[in-house]
DNA sequence: ATCGTTGGTTCGGTCACCGAACCAATCGCG
DNA sequence: CGCGATTGGTTCGGTGACCGAACCAACGAT
């Protein structure tokens, strides 16, 4: 594996943020983690949903596993691998939530592609992390995401199809 | 400028997060934004503090300016350029805060490099966004950052030196 | 006039990413 | 068991982004 063998790294940056970016700041990495929150667990599903080059996916999964963000496990009843978020990986939700909220607020050019609601009350969570109605911080597993008006309904890969109906985050797909 | 001319982009991802990453997910970009929160405003200061290739810095500043994250302004009394965070840029603080908190919690291997406190009461903010003592969300400009025990005190560039004493975020350096 | 600072651009060289092909191990099925 | 399909990769050439160094134009100060 290629351990971030860049010409230069960020290691003189003297800052936690820089060290975080060395790990999850590479191309594709955060999208893989996002898919893991969506419930994607298998190599072939990441591959089809992200349309990422196979070699890059293998490298990122290896790096994320090695660093403790994901855990590679054998699914029960077979030897097929599953990549599951660890506690460390689950800790990335606030970052993804903040980025998603920011992009929705400042980059949106039309109707929403996806929405995020509090499972307990159905209220939409603009910040993807706390419920404006209940006033509480919502655990990731109690967040329901579903397709918005602008969702792409043309894709046929297993993950894209599954995400066309409302689902809780972290609930395994397939 | 090279408008993210990658072999593939993320545009089929149907997700606000992916569109956000297209803009701020490139190498160096979030570190530039972080430095902007630290009060860095000038090309030469970004250059010295980040040790980034000049061409890459020019490209990123251009992209960030064009997309509305930074605004290029002439400083009073001279024609020298200053890159200042816009409202959109300021909106990235929760993302950077979450990433910083995550990295500190899961990647730290010793004493802290930097700390972040609430200017009003001096309490350290573990999540870099709200004050555990006051129980309120803290505006970015009321956050004070200073060097921790593990801070690097060997660097001599203007920004690194300025950051060796406690400063409010967004307060211009020099 | 000249020197230093600022804010870039240009230019090879290298390395990560891309996409397609290849491959081994396992699973499903007759 | 035999055989094809699926899964989870690795390998390989080609392209483009990043790297570092050099060059350069505009401006200020002396």
Image: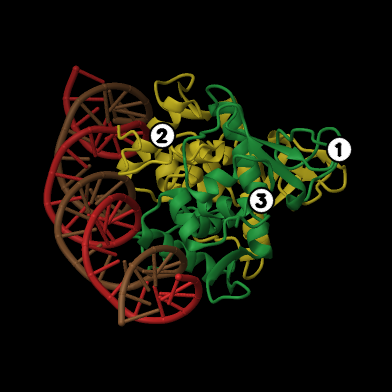
Chain colours: A yellow, B green, C brown, D red
Residue depicted at 38% across the width and 48% down the height: A52
Q: Say above or below: A167 vs A153.
A: above
Residues at marks 2 and 3, CA–CA distance in whole angstroms:
28 Å
Residue depicted at 63% across the width and 47% down the height: B95
Mark identifier at residue B135: 1
Side (left or right) of A111 relative to A62: right
Question: Residue A43 falls in which quadrant of the image?
Answer: top left
Residue named by callout 3: B93
Q: Are the residues flagged by discs 3 and 1 from a single subunit?
A: yes
Circle 2 Cα neighbour tier, 10 Å, few/some/many (<14 / 14–19 / ≥20) = many
Residue named by callout 2: A61
Residues at marks 3 and 1, CA–CA distance in whole angstroms:
18 Å
Q: Are the residues flagged by discs 2 and 1 from a single subunit?
A: no
Query: Residue B17 appears at what percent x and percent y?
Result: 57, 53
Q: Are the residues tagged 3 and 1 within 8 Å (C-beta)?
A: no
Q: Secondary structure at mark 1?
A: loop
Q: Say above or below: B174 vs A68.
A: below
Q: How many marks?
A: 3
Query: Residue A12 appears at what percent x and percent y?
Result: 44, 38
């Amino acid at each position: 594996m290629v351990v971030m063998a860049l010409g230069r790294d960020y290691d003189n940056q003297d800052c936690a943020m820089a060290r975080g970016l060395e790990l999850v700041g590479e191309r594709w990495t955060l999208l893989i983690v996002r898919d893991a929150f969506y419930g994607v667990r298998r190599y072939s599903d990441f591959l089809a949903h992200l349309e990422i080059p196979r070699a890059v996916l293998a490298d990122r999964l290896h790096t994320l596993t090695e660093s403790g963000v994901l855990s590679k496990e054998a699914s029960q009843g077979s030897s097929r691998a599953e990549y599951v978020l660890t506690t460390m990986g689950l800790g990335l939700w606030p970052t993804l939530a903040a980025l998603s909220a920011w992009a929705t607020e400042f980059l949106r050019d039309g109707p929403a592609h996806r929405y995020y609601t509090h499972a307990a009350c159905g209220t939409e969570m603009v910040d993807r992390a706390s419920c404006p109605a209940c006033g509480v911080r919502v655990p990731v597993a109690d967040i329901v995401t579903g397709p918005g008006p602008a969702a792409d309904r043309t894709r046929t890969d297993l993950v894209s199809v599954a995400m066309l109906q409302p689902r809780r985050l972290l609930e395994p797909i397939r």
